[in-house]
Amino acid sequence: MKNNAIRGFVFAAAASITLATAAHAAEFELKVAWLTADSPTDPYAIAAHAFKEEIEAAMPDRVSVSLFPNRQLGDDKEILEGLQFGTIDMGVITNAVVANIEPTYQLVDLPFLFGNSEQAHAVLDGPVGLQLEENLRTHGVVSLGAAEGGFRNMINNTRPVRTPDDVEGVKYRTMQNPVFIEMFSSLGGSPVPMAWGEVFTAMQQGAVDGLEIPTSVVNSNNYADVTKYLSFTRHTYSAIHLLISERTFEGLPEDVQMAVVNAGEVAIEKQRAAVAAAEADVVQALKDKGMEVNDIEDVGAFRARVGPVYERFEPTIGSELLNAALDAVKSE
């Protein structure tokens, strides 16, 4: 029932808007790319469709949005490079990839930093998030905010993860990002950095034993078909950023720029609510597909193992920014 409601929220408006604008082309066309499936429960897709709905409703004669899901314009790295060069207008991109061009974003991926989504939102929507966005703009990319990816969890075909010892020796695909590589090394796992487009086949063929990923992405990209265990480690909050090329943004009139910023804010608010509402249904769907689901036994044991990750990346993130985030988390 909830999935149907979400489907209606993010997809139904697209058809009516397309009909309304078919008779005449809009003044500005924005192309939005992302790497995952165009599914009504996929957080990337929900963010993209929500932005399209908001901006086209606000400026029906002036702005239209074309959507390019499922790696049509490349993986995250290629999309982000396109944003920097101005060859791609917009993207919905995971934090770890953004951190590869602006290292202060490594802060968001630190393991077990956030205990819940509210803490993450407080940091990302507050002064720390504003500083991160300012830093990113020096690379030619404008952030419209951080949408909800959900917490990342471990899935694998070796054994359930209940304690840090259960990670040891297991080959986990990680994103091509030093924080994630260091995280899994500190837990005793064998991290295998790999581009997203290669992962499903690698799981099918046993080249890797598992990966870490939000449950919504597990479901929308059919990983239950090739993976047995889902463990709610919730080791990292997955922020997925709604981004626009600075070249594209600066090429828009001021009133359109403001409309884009406002549409981004509203879209992210609606996307976060939709992803949260879908969580229970997504988990049940994965159980129905045969995945074995479990919680971890002691978060403190995991936190103790990953302490060196904070020490290694504090110089890159900056002590002031890291302490501001830690203070914000404590106050929530």
Image: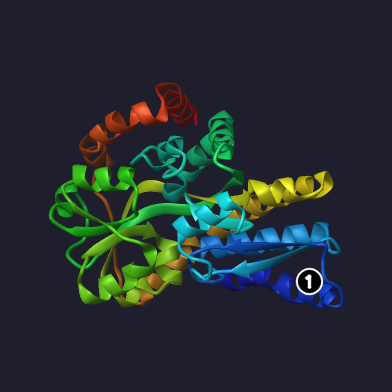
Q: Where residue 95 sits: x, y (%)?
A: 46, 48
Q: Residue at x 83, y 58 (%)?
A: 59
Q: Where residue 328 sits: x, y (%)?
A: 49, 28
Q: Nearer the viewer, residue 253 or 48?
A: 253
Residue at the top extreme?
320
Q: Where residue 272 sits: x, y (%)?
A: 58, 53
Residue 310, compared with residue 83, is above or below; it is: above
Q: Where residue 171 sits: x, y (%)?
A: 19, 59
Residue tagged 1:
17
Residue 31, compared with residue 97, is above or below; it is: below
Q: Nearer the viewer, residue 175 or 28?
A: 28
Q: Quadrant of the N terminus?
A: bottom right
Q: In the picture provided, is 195 more to the left or to the right than 262?
A: left
Which picture quadrant has residue 286?
Answer: bottom left
Q: Residue at x 32, y 67 (%)?
A: 199
Which picture quadrant has residue 54?
Answer: bottom right
Badge 1 marks a residue whose secondary structure is helix
Residue type beneath disc 1: Ile
Q: Residues within 10 Å of mark 1 (few under 14, many from 20)?
A: some
Q: In the picture provided, is 271 more to the left or to the right than 154?
A: right
Q: Residue at x 59, y 39 (%)?
A: 137
Q: Residue at x 20, y 72 (%)?
A: 206
Looking at the image, can residue 270 be seen?
yes
